[in-house]
Structures are given as structure tokens and as C-alpha cells.
Amino acid sequence: MKYRFLFCNVIFFFFCYGCQRMALKEKITRAYYLTAADVLDQCALSYNYSEEEGCFVIVPRTVFAVGFNDNYIIVKQHPDNNKKHTNYFIVPICTSDSIDIISSAIGLLTLNEFNAKKQELKIPENLTFTIIKKALQ
């Protein structure tokens, strides 16, 4: 009987806490993360307000490359893991929670629009995609 109780507690523990595990939660900078709930194909750029509120998606799946400096995060995305299409985003790094972080992303951009927007915002040429998820590329 003692072992049955222990077994039930162990199963309950894994049931409750196993659901909270994520396939990916990789810090980019400040409170910005690459996150995927179940499988890597769900990789998104997210902002983590707090442990209680969790992460809020800024650029949805499937993010496969990012780069950042003190002011911006640049993102490459295959929409819903469709590798025939590549979208680009520029995300200004917010320093205050009062700014609407989720709607701050500039994008869906083509490569030409992305390069033009980088010039317009005076984003330095040395800001490149430094974090690349090769399995998603």
C-alpha cells in the first residue's frame, strides 16, 4: 500500500509539472526569448513579462534566425514552417513594460523591405543573424 501511494504521487508530480516543460526557452536578451511549447517547429520570439504572466509571442512560428544589439532584434521566420517563404521582422527592444511590446514588431517584411527599413532606422550593417536554428532553416 505504501508503494502504491508513492507511485501515485510520482505520477501526479510528472502529470502536473511535465505540462509546464517547454521544447525551447532560450534567452536572447533582456526578457526576450525564443520559445516553443511542444516541438521546435513552434519556435517563436516571445517576451517574458514575469513567471506568473508567462511569455507573450511577438513573432509567431517558425522563427529560425535572430540577431540583436542594444536597440533591435532582427528575425527571420518561415510562416508556419513553410520553408518556401521567408519573412523578416525588426523588433525594437523595449526598456519599459508600459510600451506595447507585442505590437512593436515591424514586419512581415520581404528581404528588400527589410534592408530598406534597416537603412531607414540606421541599424548598423554589423547587426547580423547570429542565432540560427539549423533544424528549422
Image (spheres, rainbow, N blue to C red):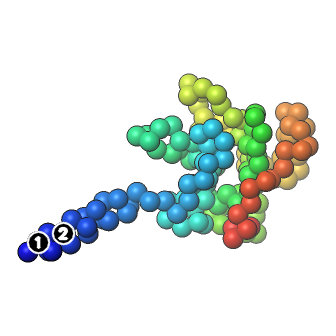
Secondary element type, mark 1: helix
Estimate the x, y position of residue 19 in percent, counting from the top left: 38, 61
Left or right placement of residue 70 versus residue 39 in this view: right
- Whether residue 104 is visible, yes or no, is yes
Does 125 appear above or below 94? below
Label 1 crowd (10 A; few <14 / some 14-19 / many >=20): few
What residue is drawn where x is 51% and y is 37%? 49
Estimate the x, y position of residue 23 in percent, counting from the top left: 52, 63
The residue that disc 2 covers is 6
What residue is drawn where x is 84% and y is 49%? 128
Secondary element type, mark 2: helix
Estimate the x, y position of residue 135 in percent, counting from the top left: 69, 71
Q: Name the image quarter holding residue 83.
A: bottom right
Do the CB atoms of the residues marked 2 and 1 lie less than 8 Å apart?
yes
Left or right placement of residue 13 versus residue 78 in this view: left
Hey, what amino acid is under mark 2? Leu
Label 2 crowd (10 A; few <14 / some 14-19 / many >=20): few
Q: Quadrant of the N terminus?
A: bottom left
What residue is drawn where x is 88% and y is 33%? 122
The residue that disc 1 covers is 2
Does 135 appear above or below 75? below
